[in-house]
Amino acid sequence: MPTIPKHWNYFLAVEAELVACARYVEFSQANFACYSNEFAKLILLAASEVDSIFQELCTHLDPSARAEKITAYYSILLTKYPLLTQCQVTIARYELTLEPWRDWTTDERPNWWSKSYNKLKHERYANLSSASLEAVLNAVGAQFLALQLYHHAVNNEYVSVDLPMRSALFGPKLPDTYKGGAFWSYGDPFAHLKPA
């Protein structure tokens, strides 16, 4: 039986609340601007977990670094994972593909972080409209990727869990050469970016 990765149960708890939202709002690009208090809560939960995971991961990768916020994580993580900002996750059930770290640079944070999480964290009621479906999907997708990177860096293996413990929504983007069949391990989240 595979070992349950650190941070995995918390991810599943956040994801379960996100899945429940799909009963009320269809997860589609047409609804990306839809916002709610529930999305705000989940963005805050997922982004603060990403912050915790990345702090631990950066300390593991570079023990001498003092990475305590997202702008400090960038150089450490991109040194180890130069394709991180291009990494995609899919929500196959809704035919969605997301790039949670796409807009991240040395000076800029991803849109879901700067335009949603930070605004909600500091002035939740004034910025409730920033708690959009698009932002929450990217925040929880970023959490999914962050724990994958953490688990691989610390344990030198890809996340592999028993079927009942699998993500209900998220999966890595598979390489274009993937022909289908059973996919029981999450594998390399960068596989779709590697030359065929």
Image (cartoon, grey):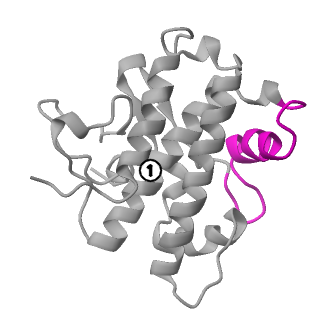
Does any portion of residue 19 appear in the rendered image? yes
User: In which quadrant of the rendered view does residue 129 lie?
Assistant: top right
Residue 149 colored in magenta in the image: no
User: In which quadrant of the rendered view does residue 31 lie?
Assistant: top right
- Pick the residue in front: 42 or 180: 42
In the picture shown, does residue 23 fall above or below 55?
Answer: above
Which structural element holds mark 1? helix
Judged left or right of residue 5, residue 30 is: right
Return the residue found at the far left: 1
Residue displayed at 82% across by 42% down: 119
Residue that label 1 marks:
145
Residue 105 colored in magenta in the image: yes
Q: Which residues are magenta?
A: 104-127
- Residue 60 lies, in percent from the top left, at 45, 79
User: In which quadrant of the rendered view does residue 24 lie?
Assistant: top right
In the picture shown, does residue 32 fall above or below 55?
Answer: above
Judged left or right of residue 90, residue 40 is: right
- Residue 17 lies, in percent from the top left, at 49, 28
Mark 1: amino acid: Leu
- Pick the residue in front: 184 or 46: 46
